Image (cartoon, grey):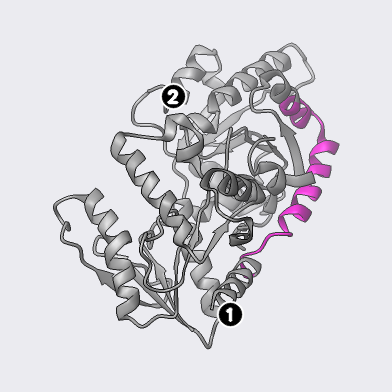
Amino acid sequence: MRIAINAAFCGQEHTGSGQYLHRLVAQLRELAAHDELVLLSPTWVAGSPLLKVASHRLTTPFDGLSVDLAKVWFEQVAFPRACQQQGVDLAQVPYFAPPLHPTVPTLVTIHDLIPLLLPAYRGSALVRLYTRLVAQAAHRAALILTDSHASRRDIIRHLRVPSDRVRVIHLAADVAYRPIPQGTHREAIRRKYGLPPSYFLYLGGFDQRKNVTALLQAFARIVTSCKLQVTSSEPWLVVAGRLPEEDTPFTPDPRRIAQELGIAEQVIFIGWVSEEDKPALYSGARGFIFPSQYEGFGLPPLEAMACGTPVIASDRGSLPEVVGSGGILVSPDDVPGLAEAMRSLWEDQALRQELSERAQRQAARFSWARAAQETLAAYREVM
């Protein structure tokens, strides 16, 4: 088979779609030795030498004039046209942007339906028009791949596509995510980011659905609780991720919230973290807290579990099937319940040990090799 892949997210490993593209292509390259992969990307994508796959950069009439129009032209015109010109057997679009008029059988990976499900994420009139376009185009896809059963249910219900055309292929944590024992490397990461010896960790975004406000409110409760108990060590919260440039209702600034709650001295904001530092950062935490209102999959809690870190996560969206019995699930609206789960995890070493073991067993159920095998099987089914 000769397979074309939309590589618009090539080189963007800091994004979920970029990670998916890179890890999937790397595994397909190993598995599909007798098949040929061709990456088709827009001109503004520099590419990535890590992928080691033939690639072609496609021009549009809007290059240098309008990023938005160039993006739509690439997805809807240049990509399907190039598929035909390259003589490929089938194509995959690894994010929610399938062509309305595919020229070859095309699979699309829809990670989630956030713009359709959450009003705050619907954007401007033009963004809503674009969402309608790609939602309609999904009906022309030969097969829809998605990351979780929760997303599959959303796709079937809201896009109204037949259930037999939506296939779940779970994502996975990279093999680099594994327990990092106490020692020189973990200590170096602790010094690099100015971390306390013990801490809770949050790593992710700061938009509304991530629910960081509830996390800070819950943490404020356990700070008060521990101060009342002489035997309790002082809790710390480390917040990682690129902080919002503006404090808005859509992206509330967690620094302001921590200040208002009176916990600013016990919350450490470390900003963006490089991929190579994350396993040690996860491994050093007493617990990873992820109270998101909605996730199509949720890689951060899976990465934490792969590192043996106990997880407290939301019981919404895909998180129950990702976390499974490997962590504690709490309603994202239940701040007292979240606080109680955090307090128990902070104080109970036996609970942390039990959850650490369960977390590693749960994380081992997911692998990129399996994801690539199932994707390759989907290709062959379409052919």
Q: Judging from the image, what secondary structure is the residue with disc 2 in?
A: loop
Q: Is residue 368 magenta?
A: yes
Query: In the rendered view, does 374 fall on the left or right side of 3?
Result: right
Q: Position of residue 65 (x, y in %)?
A: 14, 52
Q: Nearer the viewer, residue 197 or 83?
A: 83
What range is drawn magenta here?
341-369
**Percent from the top left, x then y, of residue 179?**
69, 54
Foreground disc of the pair 1, 2: 1
Asked whether residue 308 is in view, the answer is: yes
Q: Residue at x 58, y 32 (%)?
A: 293
Q: Position of residue 358 (x, y in %)?
A: 80, 49
Specify whether residue 163 is painted magenta. Answer: no
- Which mark sits nearer the N-terminus, 1 or 2? 1
Residue at screen point 70% across, 22% down: 339
Q: Residues within 10 Å of mark 2 (few under 14, many from 20)?
A: many
Amino acid carrying label 1: it is: Leu
Residue 181's place in the image compared with 195, above or below, is: below
Residue appearing at x 38%, y 59% in the figure: 9
Which residue is disc 1 drawn over?
31
Q: Quadrant of residue 221?
A: top right
Given contact means CB atoms under 8 Å apart, are the residues at marks 1 and 2 in contact? Answer: no
Q: Which residue is mark 2?
A: 252
Under circle 1, the secondary element is: helix
Compared with residue 222, is residue 305 higher up or lower down, i.e. above or below?
below
In depth, the one of 291 and 256 nearer the eye is: 291
